[in-house]
Amino acid sequence: MQINSILRPCHPAILSLQTVKTMEKILIVDDELSMREFLKILLEKEGYDAMVAADGDAALAALGNNAVDLLITDVRMPGTSGLELLKQCKDDNLNLPVVMITAFASPDDAVFAMKQGAYDYITKPFQVDEIKTVVKNALKSRASIPEKPLESGQTSFQGIVGRSPEMGKIFDLIRRIAPTPANVLIQGESGTGKELVARAIHALSPAAGHAFVPISCNAIPESLFESELFGHVKGSFTGAVANKEGLLVQADKGSAFFDEIGELTPFIQTKLLRVLQEREFKKVGDTATTRVNLRIISATNKDLEEEVINGDFREDLFYRLAVIPLRISPLRERKEDIPLLIDHFLEKYSRRFDKNITDISTYARQVLMEYDFPGNVRELENIIERGVALEGSNIILPESLTLSSHRKDTTTDDTSSGDTRPVTAPFSEERLFDIGLEKIMAQTEKRLIERGLARAGNSKIKAAELLKISFRSIRYKIKKYGIK
Ligand SMILES: Nc1ncnc2c1ncn2[C@@H]1O[C@H](COP(=O)(O)OP(=O)(O)OP(=O)(O)O)[C@@H](O)[C@H]1O
Ligand SMILES: [Mg+2]
């Protein structure tokens, strides 16, 4: 019991001093009188209608008698605890965001509460600006929760195409978690659409008007990570010729998307954990602290739980990043999405290449249905893109699904690299069935990348430009195929 509770008035239940109907009503629950009053005064100054309750039971009574828009509650209180109160609100289906107040020393309470459906948390001691932002966002989140549940059988959501039960669950999760500021960890094989999902979460969140900042964890060397992430002040190290704004500042009020989070070195993991715990950091060479308010969405194609078990990824950081874990299945485990995706990409690339390709042959469709797509949706997209580019008729035939062969007896469109192999030679079905699509695609991709590199004088950046793929993608493929 807090010392302040002895100061509580005899009938502390509810003190509602201001009840202007149009104002948003916030219920503050804390057993500590000074804390209740501090929050009440602060929030009233901000123009809200603030009510207070001194314990969980009083809060439940107040919730029963008032249309409350936001609940702010201490976690640890005698009697009904903040977590029980949260659970009650969820059980009763009260559509109101709940913000938890936790002691600085017990951040795990906060993570736990978020998992139970709390909207956000504020840590004691308070930062006035932090409270104002959290309250504003929490109230805004009410407005942005789409009222309408997803239609059953919906086949696309925010540009994400799919009709498998797995994708249905992803659509639903995105819709429900987007309005909250909870950190999200998206796991899935390469090309399953992790970035697409991350962008959808941001687009549907109250932070949609602010930046979505992708941060490629594997593209930034450890020595530069701090200065990239936190920024630096001029003169803080050789080469720091001007002040630099870090990526986290760019993402302030928005979302930072940490891609390939599993690649973070232990040193950087520790740095990031501190930012997540304290929501502040120091720029390299700066003495002042910078506060940011952002949501972290991260993605990885590694099994991060396994990395934690192996000791390669910090467990405490994992739990902070994975408040909401989300896993996207590989395409081979949700084949019913393949026909939809084929149609989606056919339309996209027909339009882009200004062609009138309306369908893909039944046989070509079948080949794709039987393929297991190690590169997932990205690979399917690439296959269709190439198919549309190569196809002369208005229907994609199996020949256009594959790009090249080993035969050296056909003409070539490119001799500059000394490679006389055709890029687009169609080849026989026997060959396709003999070797199998997967191997042929892999060989083809490998050879085309080698050619791109040869043409670009071995510059990965130039080769990526020539091949119209991202630098990250070419680097990944070079590694995958062991290209020297
Ligand atoms: N369900 C989907 N509907 C439509 N397009 C999709 C879907 N899933 C993936 N894509 C497309 O596939 C490509 C790859 O998706 P994305 O970059 O999001 O994958 P990723 O999981 O982040 O891959 P990586 O791990 O390699 O970074 C993108 O062009 C994306 O638009
Ligand atoms: Mg990605």
Image: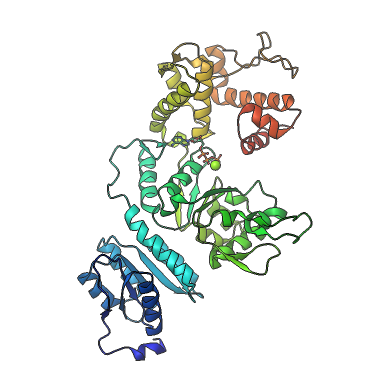
Towards the viewer: 367 or 74? 74
The residue located at (39%, 35%) in the rendering is 162
Q: Position of residue 320 (x, y in %)?
A: 51, 61
Picture quarter containing residue 170?
A: top left
Total marks shown come to: 0
Residue 109 shows in this picture: no
For ligand 2, give the image quadrant: top right
Q: Position of residue 115 (x, y in %)?
A: 41, 61
Towards the viewer: 336 or 260? 260
Does residue 166 appear to the left or right of 225 in the view shown?
Answer: left
The residue located at (62%, 23%) in the rendering is 444
Q: In which quarter of the image is the N terminus?
A: bottom left
Q: Which residue lies furthest to the right in this view?
A: 238
274 up-or-down from 156: above or below? below
Q: Position of residue 412 (x, y in %)?
A: 67, 12
Q: Position of residue 28 (x, y in %)?
A: 34, 74
The coloring applied to the image is rainbow
Q: In which quarter of the image is the C terminus?
A: top right
The residue located at (47%, 14%) in the rendering is 397
Residue 59 shows in this picture: yes
The residue located at (27%, 47%) in the rendering is 148
Towards the viewer: 320 or 28? 28
163 up-or-down from 111: above or below? above
Does residue 464 appear to the left or right of 383 in the view shown?
Answer: right
Q: Which residue lies furthest to the left in this view?
A: 65
385 up-or-down from 148: above or below? above
